[in-house]
Amino acid sequence: MLIRTTAALALLTTTAMAQQTDITIGMQLEPPNLDPTGGAAAAIDEVVYANLFEGLTRFGPDGSVQPALAQSWDVSDDGTVWTFALHNGVTFHDGSAMDADDVVFSLDRARADDSTNAQKALFDGIESVEAVDPATVKITLSAPNGNLGFNLAWGDAVIVAPETAETNATMPVGTGPFRFGQWVQGDRVDLTAYDAYWGDAPALTDATFKFVSDPNAAFAAMMAGDIDAFPNFPAPETLSNFAADPRFTVIVGSTEGETILGINNVAIPDVKVRQAIAHAIDRQAVIDGAMFGYGTPIGTHFAPHNPDYVDLTGQSAYDPAKAKALLEEAGATDLTLRLMLPPPVYARRGGEIIASQLREVGIETEISNLEWAQWLEQVFRGKDFDLTIVSHTEPADINIYARPDYYFQYDNADFQNLMERIETTTDAGERTAMLQQAQQVIADDAVNAYLFQLAKTGVADARIDGLWENAPTQANDLTGVSWSE
C-alpha cells in the first residue's frame, strides 16, 4: 500500500511538473507602447513580434524569411508585382476575420504621408496594394525589389485591423498565437494563448514579460526562480555563475545589434572631428569593460556575420595621437560635447569608458543618463544631443543612413542614390558590391563611431526548450518554446 501510494504521488508530481505551461521572461527595458507600427523601441517587438502580431512574412530563428499570414507568394517576371495567398480562417483576437482588406489597410497606413511608422522607408517602393479577393493580395512596386519579402517580415509591417489600429499602443489586437492580457506599467505585460489561433497552438498557455532594469535585481530574480528566462541578460559579468549552476543554461549567440557612438552630424559637421572621436576610442576596452568581453568590434554599420560585411575596423583604429592631430587640424582643441545615455548596460557602462577615452585626447563630455522614454523623445525624435550610445537591432538596416531626418542627421545625396540602386538591383553580385561600397562610404565620412556587434547573452532555466540562440530580429519569439522535465 505504501509503495502504491508513493508511486502514485510520484506520478502525480511528475505529471504536474510536466504540465507547466506558463513562463516569465525577463527584459531590462519596458516598451513605451505595444504597437510595433507606431514606435521605434526594440522592446516593443521583444514582447509582441510573432507572439501577438504577425505580418505577411516573418523572420525565422536563423534569419530566413518564412511564410506567416501569407502561406505563399508569386513574383512577376519583371519583379514589380508580388501576389500573396493568405491563410484561410485567420481571426484577430477580438474574433473578427482577417482578410485581404486588412492587409491593404495596414500597408497603406504604414506608407501614408502622415504615417508614424518608424520604418516607413520599408514601404517606399510600393505603388499600390490591392485586394484581389478576400484571400489574395497584390502589391505593385514602382521598381523591382527582391527585398520585399524581407521588408514585410519586420515588426513594423504587421497586419492590424482598422477597428483597433488606433488603440494598439495600450490594448493591442493582433492575429498571433497569444492575445493581450494586461499591462501593469512599470512591472509586466501578460499574454495568454489565443484559443482560436489559425496555426499550430503554442505549448505555452501564459507568458509574462517582467521588466527588471537593474542588473543586480535581474541576477537575484533569476537565482530565486522569479524569472524563468532572461534572453538578453543585462549583467554579463555574472554569466559564469549561471554556467556553473546546473539549474541554468547560458545561451550566447549573435544579434543584428550594431552598437555605435551616435554622432549628431549637424552639431558636429566637421568630418575631421568625427574621425578624431572614432580614433580616440579603444573598442576592445569598451567591450571588455562594459560587456565583459562579449561583443565583436565593427568599423561600419554592418553585422560581421553578414556575407557582405567588410572589416573596416583598421580604418578607425584606436590612435590617440592621430585623434589629437585631427582635432588640431580642425581647430577644435577646446571641445565639450553632450553625451546622452539610455538605460542599457552597454550604454551606461560604455559611456563612462568612452568619456574617459575622449578626455585623453582633449574632448570633455557632459553625461546625461536618460530613461528610455526620455531618450526616444530628446535624442531619437528631438535630435537634441551631441553624442549617444545605442544598439541598432533592426536587421540589415544600413539604409537608415539614406534618411537625412534620422536622428544622427547624415545627409549625403550620393549615398542616398546608392541605396536607391541597391533597392532595385536583383543581381546578387552587384548588390554585394554596392553594399560593400555603402559600408565604405559611411566609414569614410565617420558618420558615427562604430563600436561592436552586440552579443546575445541569455540565461534560462535548463528545462526550457526553444528559445532563440541568435537574434536575427528584435524578438522573444515564444511560438516554439516549451518546458521539458
Image (cartoon, rainbow, N blue to C red):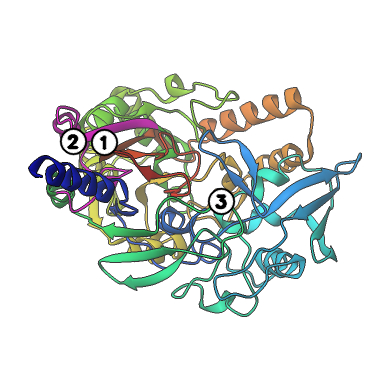
Q: Closer to us: mark 3 or mark 2?
A: 3
- Tell which of 464 and 56 is nearer to you: 464
Q: Hey, which residue is sitting farthest front in the picture? A: 1
Task: Give coordinates of residue 259: x percent, y percent.
Answer: 39, 39
- Dot 3 surroundings within 10 Å: few (below 14), some, or many (20 or more)? few
Q: Alpha-carbon neighbours of circle 1 within 10 Å: few (<14), some, or many (≥20)?
A: some
Q: Report helix, strand or loop for mark 3.
A: loop
Residue type at mark 1 is Ala
Q: Vertically, is 312 above or below 105?
A: above
- Mark 1 lies on a secondary structure that is loop
**Magenta segment includes 78:** no
Q: Which residue carries the number 2 mark?
A: 247
Task: Report the magenta residues as a range.
Answer: 225-253
Residue 462 tag number: 1
What residue sits 65% from the left and 65% below the top? Answer: 110
Please name whichever residue, 392 or 177, is drawn nearer the observer in this view of the structure: 177
Which residue is painted at 85% across and 65% down in the image? 133
Residue 38 position, x and y percent, is 53, 66
The answer to whether residue 343 is above or below residue 170 is above
As for residue 240 lying within the magenta part, the answer is yes
**Residue type at the position of mark 3:** Asp
* Residue picked out by circle 3: 200
> Left or right of 195: which side holds 25?
left
Q: Are marks 1 and 2 in contact (CB under 8 Å)?
A: yes
